[in-house]
Amino acid sequence: MEEMERLQSTKQELPGSSIILGQIIPRFYSDRRLATEYEQKRHFMNNLIIELCWEIDIVHVEYDNMKFIDYTDGIHLNSYGVISRNGTINERGYSESNNTPLLE
């Protein structure tokens, strides 16, 4: 996987830097079929992201706390969604609340 090689080479070229990979955000489709298809694909891809992050030891961010009010139309984030939903940081099974900084 080309992306994995890029992440690994970045870690090697910039030792001491932090790489944070965000999961795919939820969407709120009004069409039930589209919503089901998207959620299945999102779940599959997010599991791949988690595995990748564990494999090469980088941080991933989960966005499972997103709500419909964070979007203008269920698909595109509004300003509230962009500012207030930083996600939950997970690094090797460790979790922080959204109110703490990503890195210290």
Image (spheres, rainbow, N blue to C red):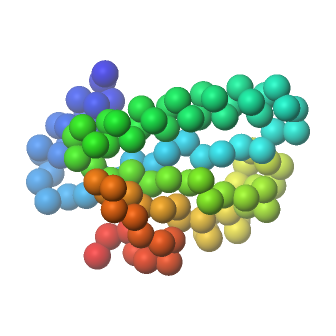
The quarter of the picture where the C terminus appears is bottom left
Q: Give the residue displayed 41% in from the left and 38% down from the top.
A: 49
Corner quadrant of residue 77: bottom right
Q: Give the residue displayed 41% in from the left and 69% down from the top.
A: 96
Q: Position of residue 54 (x, y in %)?
A: 28, 43
Along the horizontal axis of the image, is 95 left or right of 62? Answer: left
The quarter of the picture where the N terminus appears is top left
Along the horizontal axis of the image, is 39 left or right of 43? Answer: right
Along the horizontal axis of the image, is 14 left or right of 96? Answer: left
Q: Position of residue 72 (x, y in %)?
A: 81, 55
Report the residue that reaches farthest toward the right: 30
Q: Give the residue displayed 45% in from the left and 54% down from the top.
A: 61
- In this rendering, is residue 104 above or below 4? below
- In this rendering, is residue 48 above or below 63? above
Q: Position of residue 53 (x, y in %)?
A: 31, 43
Residue 78 visible at all: no
